[in-house]
Image (cartoon, rainbow, N blue to C red):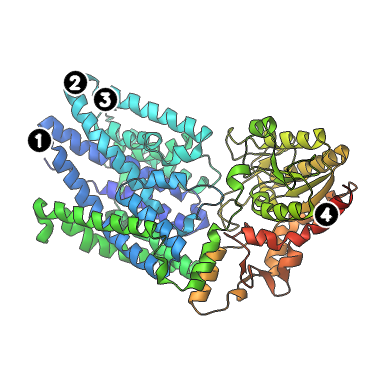
Amino acid sequence: MMQKYRPDIDGLRAVAILPVLFFHAGISVFAGGYVGVDVFFVISGFLITRIIHTEIQQGSFSILKFYERRARRILPALFATCLFCIVMAWWLFVPLDFKDFARSLTAAMLFASNFLFMGETGYFAQPSEIKPLLHTWSLAVEEQYYIVFPLFLMVAAKFLRNYLGLSVIVITLASFAFCIWATGYRPVYAFFLSPSRAWELLIGSVLALGVIPLVADKRVLNGLSLLGLACILVAIFVFNADTDFPGWQAAIPCLGAGLLIYANGQAETIGGRILSFKPFVWIGLISYSLYLWHWPIIVFAKYTAGGELSPLALWGLIALSIAVATLSWKFVEQPFRRKTGAFANIRVFAPACFAGGLLLTGTGVSGHITNGFPERWSPEVRRFASAREDINSRSEECHHRSPKDLASREACRFGPAQGAPKFMVWGDSHADATMPAFTTLAARYKVPGWFASYGGCPPLLTAYRIDRTRRHQCKQFNDTVAKLIADNGIETVFLISRWTIYSDGHNDDGPQSTKRTFIGSASHKERTRVSSQKAFAEALEITLAAMAKSGARVYLLEQVPEHYALVPTLLARAVAAGTDPAGIRLPLEDHLERQSYVVSRFDKSALPPGVVRLDPASRMCDEKGCKVVDGAITLYNDYQHLTGTGAEWIAPLFEPAFEEMAKSQ
């Protein structure tokens, strides 16, 4: 039996996709636009469960026919989008970028993107804005859900007929509880894993099963529909990148979507009339194609431009995405779903799907195995692009050791194998990136030393990351390092960090990101920029005082200039275009502005005797700007971390300190 068409649900799809589109385009007012994906999950859970449950009750449900419908709904437009991405990536992406894309293509074809992208987080991960298939994680979550849930319904309808609704509610609550726990323990798990997202689809399933009693009073239904719409709008316009998400906050837009589906299914409500507005319905009809196409279009445009785009360009990309989505819906989605043309017969459609999936998967595997088909580019292009892999060779051994591990066995050592350590390098991933310089100098001057770095953690006593979970032991790590310095009579300490991320709050995706990375201290614990800066100032004073008390001389390394795009890719594309890579520079005024608060604190805080400030800009910048390449040496492996050769290139900054330590031995 055909289900009654509900235009309000297509309108709800529009309310889901438009915020996602605007959010990805960087329209700041839609800071919580990512919740549109959660609204999609609720809609999908409702529609699919309603179909399955009805067919099971009628005795007409076929698991094979169900998967055929899913394939006709999902695969043609997905294949078309992936084919477009292959062509664009082949044309634009340098080898390592193509290799990363190829891996994501394979994962998308296997509906395992969520697992892949869950593992691609951290300082040295590829930025999200050059992952054209990043958004396929949500498709993976849905399809994983629909592998299991129809089978559950079939079994439950037979053996738990009287408890079907209760069973689904229990599973929903269990998934929600896991989501809340995971958000506090490991947010990346909560965001990407199906078990922590299943409750969102299950809200729709609960509604489809008719578990919730009906309401006859239209005034109540009108109120529920408006409340539902308000919940979604609040999430879109109040949530931002600092919101602990998904967690319990995801319940706000999900319950909002559930209220709209519930209320509008019983009567024509005010909310239903709003959602049934024809432009909303039309956007809802093309929403799947719009979701698929908008992100690759934005990614490839930014990749071509080498950075951020103007507001006018972004609005142009939004318009282009809607146009392409309309064509995709009309000429790709509709023919397959309506079973018209040559692919109407399952005996033609199924082999075609298998062949298309196999071809795309094979392309992904080949791109990964060949390291991104490097022969597409000249040796010079490949040389610049390969700088992404030029990282500290001892990073895996020495970086991000736990406080317990650091305290229980000797810190990573520089220089001679014997002798008490005379210096300590202490910092975050910027210290890790700089390690090759100290390795070279310690060996040259025969000065023994130790190394201690912890990702995302400033080398400042009392400081901790407000945005990180309890697993991130920043304060404990710093306390351990300070104790090692005091107990072992360390004479010289190098403090190295990405200072501005903690004072200004910019995150791992670069200074243009809306995500904030705030720190707290004993006296300042609010998740605001002002509070984070006060915590920074307080922790800096405490740290320098502690080092002075222990008798250590402090060398304070100011931050290396921070760029706005992947430097190796910029250099490689410049060479490919026939332009001089040396011409790529960060304007000096941008660097100075970015560092202004930190420098002001260093000016005020560098008062204890023995504190020496070192400025990488003295080697890297001049009136023309801050360079990213010096002859054959690429200085960065991303947009902020030095390459291994880049670290050795700035070693002269530290050489006077080693000369002094060598004399005192």
**SS for dot 4:** helix
Left or right of 381 in this view: 615? right
Q: Are marks 2 and 4 in contact (CB under 8 Å)?
A: no
Q: Earlier in the sequence, mark 1 or mark 2?
A: 1
Image disc number at residue 657: 4
Which x, y percent locates residue 28? 52, 56
The alpha-carbon separation of the residues under discs 4 and 3 comes to: 71 Å
**Mark 2: which amino acid?**
Phe
Which numbered disc flags the more N-terminal residue, 1 or 3?
1
Q: Nearer the viewer, mark 2 or mark 4?
A: 4
Residue furthest bottom as drawn = 578
Instruction: Compare marks 3 and 2 and give the one earlier in the sequence.
Output: 2
Mark closer to the chain start, 2 or 4: 2
Q: How many marks?
A: 4
Distance (Cα) linking label 2 and label 4: 76 Å
Q: Which quarter of the rendered picture does the N terminus lie within?
A: top left
Find numbered disc 3 in the image and state the secondary structure of the residue it sits on: helix
Disc marking residue 159: 2
Residue 60 is marked as: 1
Q: CA distance from mark 1 to mark 3?
A: 20 Å
Residue 644 horizontal/vertical position (percent) = 63, 58
Dot in front, 1 or 4: 4
Find the distance from the CA under tag 1 to the CA under tag 4: 80 Å
Which of 515/662 is in front?
Answer: 662
Q: Amino acid at mark 3?
A: Gly
Q: Residue at x 33, y 37 (%)?
A: 201
